Amino acid sequence: MKKELYDVIIIGAGVIGASIARFLSRFNVKCLILEKHNDVGEEASGANSAIVHSGYDPKPNTLKAKFNVIGAKMFDKINDELDVNYIKTGTLTIGFNNDDLITLKSLKERGEINGVETSIIGKDELFKLEPNLNKNVLYGLYAKEAGIVNPFLLVSGLIENALENNIDLKLNSEVIKIEKIMDFYRVFTKDKGIYETKVLVNASGRNGDYITSFIEKPKFKITPRKGQYILFDHFDDHFINRPLFMCPTKMGKGVLVSKTTSNNYYIGPTNEASSLDDVSTTKEGFDYLKKESLKLINNLPIKDAIREFSGVRANNNIDDFIIEESNLNEGFFNVSSIMSPGLASSLAIGEYVSNLIQNRLNLKINENYNPYIRKYPKFNNYEKLKDLININPLYGKFICRCEKVSEGMIIDMIHRKGGPTTVKGIKKRLRAGFGRCQGTFCQEEVIKILSRELNIPIDEVNYSDLGTNILKYRSK
């Protein structure tokens, strides 16, 4: 039986696959994204430091440096178009002694080569910027062009916009086999779907070398590293005002302390050898993060810690991004091992790769392309809340009290293109269940809303992937 032929298939709906798809939608293209999970952004894209690095740190003349510097400058525009909660905060890298000062100076010089402005500041200026710093700090490297972003909304916004511009998405479609047949690729998935395409993009994150091996011998090897984090509740809007980094050493960048776009705080990550799927957290990791973070700040309110989480980074043995078309198999694009600063680089990578594909396929401009999504309904004062309630009274019915998420907001999100179908999907996009009670009060109501709006039985609502049903059977 003849299979439907796509122009492009993208494997992976993390931030890189989502970005490539969104920028591809600028052209008239028949494109499909295949994602093995039950939602987008489920791996490293949803468990990272959420920092838009300015680009002073990557080694000059690497792909990391190139795409980080370009990508960081694209976030103001994408925030306007996709409502991703990007905030330009700047970052501080902290030094404690003269050896650290030498390192900070070398980072400043590296930034100058990369085209990134930084400045070294002393103790007095540091404490004006961050009054809660540890009293032992002496120096800081200030990168004013850096910022923070909501990584969940970044991925879901890119996907929503791509789908609105006629890109297709299939979830629960893990790729298990690829065949090269003359001038096209045949892609087999675990759910027995078979698809054919002229161009194949490997944006599978930590599985990048595995997916490549279906077609050719990889030139690189993924060496996964796990990072554990501790997340804190809202306790003080100005405890710190920007991400704080340790001065890097031969052992790595160390633990950072940062705020989120929702005015939570977190510390992390650890840096541990890991298997591809190990996202466990440990007491040893918790104790290590607590001890190390106190070198940066005073009075860490450990009582306000509300959860631990971890993510696996797709590090590799060449310490740079893999972004290239295969010289053995035309039309196979490897966009793999996008480790830190991958989030900051994602938009630049998406635009670059989409342009390569456009040139290969001679794609025409999509005259109906719309770069904007509909703004998310939200409020920051009583008057705006009243306006929302006048539109729909359900905007005034609060489901998650910790994070101020209403039923109207949940319904709006569910019915968007690529909208959530799981409890975790709602949690990632709207923060219902992210607060101090961690879903104790709101999870039951979220399940009911998902069941009703998706028109499925309540015991078929999953927490995340298929088979993670929270309700199994009626007890009474």
Image: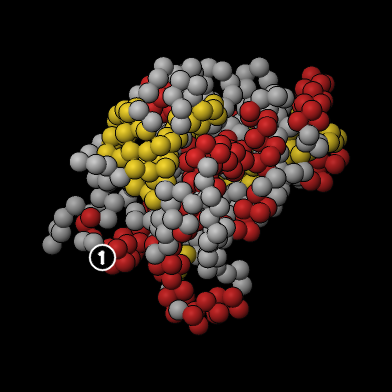
Q: Quadrant of residue 53?
A: top right
Q: Quadrant of residue 58?
A: top right
Q: Residue sitting at 59 percent across and 24 percent down?
A: 320
- Circle 1 Cα neighbour tier, 10 Å, few/some/many (<14 / 14–19 / ≥20): few
Residue placed furthest toward the bottom: 390
Q: How far across and how far down the image is residue 241, in percent?
A: 70, 48
Q: How far across and how far down the image is residue 229, in percent?
A: 52, 37
| 93 to the left or right of 342 | right
Kind of residue sitting beneath label 1: Asn
Which residue is nearer to you in this view: 179 or 156?
179
| Residue 92 appears in the figure | yes
| Residue 230 appears in the figure | no
Q: Residue sitting at 60 percent across and 78 percent down?
A: 383
- What residue does disc 1 label? 455
Question: Tell me, what colour scheme is on the image?
Answer: secondary structure
| 464 to the left or right of 333 | left
Quadrant assignment for the N terminus: top left
